[in-house]
Amino acid sequence: MKEEENETSPKDEEKLKECTSKTESPQPGSSKDCISFQNSPESSDAQSKDALFEPTVDMLVNDFDEEQTLEEEEALAAKEHVDPTEELSDLQRESEMPIEELLKLYGCAPQAFNSNSSASRKRRRRREQLSPAKISKVDDEALKENLKSAETISTSSTVVDPPVNIQNEENAEDSAEEDGTTTATTNTTNYIENQSLDDETNYDDEEPSELKKLYTGLYENNELKLLADDEDDLDYIPDEEDGRKTIMVGSDYQAVIPDSVKYDDALPYENEDKLLWDPSKVKDDDIEDYLFKFSTAVNGATNHTSSQSTETKHLRDDEQALLLLVQCGNNFEEALRRRRLGVAVPTNTMSIWSEEECRNFESGLRLYGKSFHEIQASKVTTRSVGELVEFYYLWKKTDRADLFASKARLEKKKYNINPCVTDLMEKYLEEYDNSGTNRERERDRSVSPNLNSNSMLSADSKRHHRETSSGIANNNHNQHSPDKLKLMKQIDEGAAIKTE
Amino acid sequence: MSSRKVSYAFCGEVGNFHYGPGHPMKPHRLSVIHHLVMNYGLHKKMSIFRPYKATAQDMTRFHDSDYIDFLQKTLPGNVSLQDHKQFNLGDDCPIFDGLFDFCSMYTGASLEGAQKLNHNQSDICINWSGGLHHAKKFEPSGFCYVNDIVISILELLKYHPRVLYIDIDVHHGDGVQEAFYLTDRVMTVSFHKYGDKFFPGTGSMYEIGAESGRYYSVNVPFKEGIDDQSYFQVFKPVISQVMEFYRPTVIVLQCGADSLAGDRLGCFSLSTRGHGDCVKFVKELNVPTLILGGGGYTLRNVARCWTYETSLCVDEQISNELPMNLYIEFFKPEFVLHVDESQGRRIENANSKQYLEAITKHTYDILKMCQNSPSVQFMSIPEDALPDEKDRITEEPDADVRMSQRDIDSMVEKNNEFYDDENDNDKNEGD
């Protein structure tokens, strides 16, 4: 089978190229016009005999040969009928028929289009299917062209050699049948065939053709169906059959690859990036020394955490100190001098939240859930949405949040609100988290309201076990985290006020 | 010991976004990672850059301008039903406050990382905020709006003849594969869960690329529950083969952490160590690498994993004990880096040994085809062309000369040539 694929592939590729070159310039709004076909066998109910061939994993793994199916198909097609000569004479008759009758024939019974099927077409289609490149987008133009040429040919069918005629009849059928389920590859093939036919035979397209109208009508129908399919596609429901999808090919999907390896003088953007820290310039020891001096300089001013850091001999990296050092061109003295002068280093840290802001945030959270946008708009107008998000994550692991959560739970019991499914999951996860939080409560909080039985149960042995196992982390926690403690304290104070 | 220059994108604000209630994607994980990385002192070992913010123009190098325009203008609340349909918005990809800022931050960081690799300013660039591999040219998909990976690969292609993209997210890297489906200049290799309607539904082993890109898309589908050993048993030989056959000059590695055990959306059983082994393996290939984030929906695990991988990139041993940081509460009760997450809700490894072997063999077969298939790039681009040399070329190289003197010289230098100079072995010369 592999060999077979290789044989066909160059040809396929050629076709694909032709097709893509055709579709290369996307028209405005072409995203909407583009048709994405899925090879869902289900959707092709209408023409189940044209059901797409989908090689199953087993088939491919075991080098399954489709010869057998081919034979079956051919036998089937033979049963269906049709003697080519009979078909030809039919066509002949149709071409001489007055247009009204013809319209009647086809307009009233569109299924007539489907009646003559040919094994050869199926085979071709199947072969195309096997090639992994499924062009899933058809340009409207291509379709139109396809129809036009098909029309030209059938109007002048008397002149044309019989075989060609048959083929074009097929094409006409194809285009009429195509309602979004066949892969575009077939279209491509038809299109290309038609193109070549056009080139070979110069038909006179003088007679204004009623057939054209007929086909346009059909085409429009077609388009409608295609659009409907398109919308289905946008709903993004995974293919019901097996959840599989195809990779789309076309200018709407692939990136435009830049030409080869060439240096483009114009930078894609101005260099706006800012160096915050470069470790290669200075030695570690010097930095430690500097950080120590820096922190004492800080402590001289605020006298806040000095006892801690000297006691523990532990130096935390101060990002601001490092940034200042970089700004001073790695000159330690200058950095320290600036520090002593109290030059403000740009900070990213949030300013402290007021109790009112906290309260507003919580009531917003209660009202809107985690729609921070809405909370920002109606409750905490003093903060940006980004700050709200940051605050939320720091807040959610505090006592205050526990209090909030248990209150919310009580309320929920009271009103028995039925949230949607995703919210349930979220809630579940949150509760799961919170039950953990309760366990930890006593560790670093002075205020420790035991709000539910859960915390009481787990407040003993497990907690102790944890404390002994990660005592160091715990110590660290209490000693070296001025930032965190500050924030916690601030939040907890709020909680305390509330509980009082 | 590491002689490789590592750059790390740091953006304080990129974590302060929220997809909306109930959404599993939590950008705030990025803040947590930054804190861990800083508190482990890893920033001392690499240069930190505050990334550039990508403009709409940068994004339209891949995406449709209408789509980017829409992202830029839209606000939560002013989305029409038609927009919803046209751009495939919905629960997965909501319009949230600051959406475009978020996109431009992570995209800019990836783009700048690519730029740094191009200019040889760095050997490894890390951007944990990037790696949103599902986004399509015309629409968002699977929590991804702008495909920073495609955009940065396009940037890399300016200098690099062959870019290798590796994806170890639990989901198939469909957006990237699709974008480069028809080209042999980018090989996409994705390891992912496939089947049972698992998102995004693509990624079968038979998706191998098309046209000149045929055989340049490699997909390694796994079943659920794959563990460290099984994963690496496939990952290592596949990547080795890819390196041998494709010989990329630069690698983009998407480190989606949803392939870890205990992920909210994933279903693999990898540990942080197992996940990290893949990163380490790629790093030790000694090819310039852009390391990006991706999925990962259990916040604490993502932070652990990417912190650990940052330490691997800078060759730094870090203690299992987590350092104190603002987010320490998220890591209870263990407060350690490597946790056995699989305990309790273990997912059975559905990948039999035979299956894994079959998959590996299949991939080999495809890669062999890739070697045999003619490629314009293999012919026209000098084998060892390095970006830094390219920088120095001031004039257009003569198209008739197969290899300029400069190229020959530089190749000798690079390859530890046995002979003293180009004419050392040339008996006809100098007679």
Image (tube, rainbow, N blue to C red):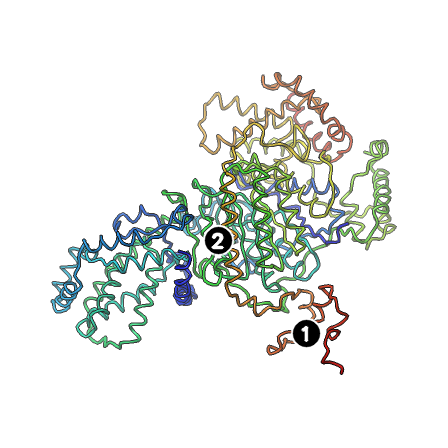
Q: Disc 1 residue type?
A: Thr
Query: Is residue B39 or residue B411 the one in the foreground?
Result: B411
Question: Would you identify the image quadrant in which residue A487 lies?
Answer: top right
The chain holding disc 2 is: B
Rendering coords of residue A255 (x, y %): 50, 60
Question: Residue shown at 34%/67% (left/top)?
Answer: A192
Classify residue A41 as left or right of residue B335.
left
Classify residue A253 as left or right of residue B151.
left
The residues tagged by marks 2 and 1 sit, at their Cα atoms, a distance apart of: 37 Å
Question: Would you identify the image quadrant in which residue A5 lies?
Answer: bottom left
Indicate whether B387 appears above or below A418: below
Q: Which residue is denoted by mark 2 in the rendering?
A: B136
- Is the C-beta separation of discs 2 and 1 under 8 Å? no
Question: Residue shown at 26%/77% (left/top)?
Answer: A202
Element at label 2: loop
Q: Quadrant of the C terminus of chain B?
A: bottom right
Query: Is residue B206 or residue B64 the one in the foreground?
Result: B206
Rendering coords of residue A139 (x, y %): 36, 62
Q: Disc 2 residue type?
A: Lys
Name the disc covering residue A16, or none.
Answer: none
Count neighbours of disc 1 (C-alpha within 10 A) and say few if under 14, some if 14 to 19, many if 20 or more: few
Res. A419 visible in picture: yes
In the displayed orientation, state which residue is furthest to the bottom. B431
Query: Is residue A194 or residue A6 the one in the foreground?
Result: A6
Rendering coords of residue A242 (x, y %): 39, 43
Element at label 1: loop
Classify residue B415 as left or right of residue A338.
left
The chain holding disc 1 is: B
The mark nearer the N terminus, 2 or 1, is 2
Q: Which residue is denoted by mark 1 in the rendering?
A: B394
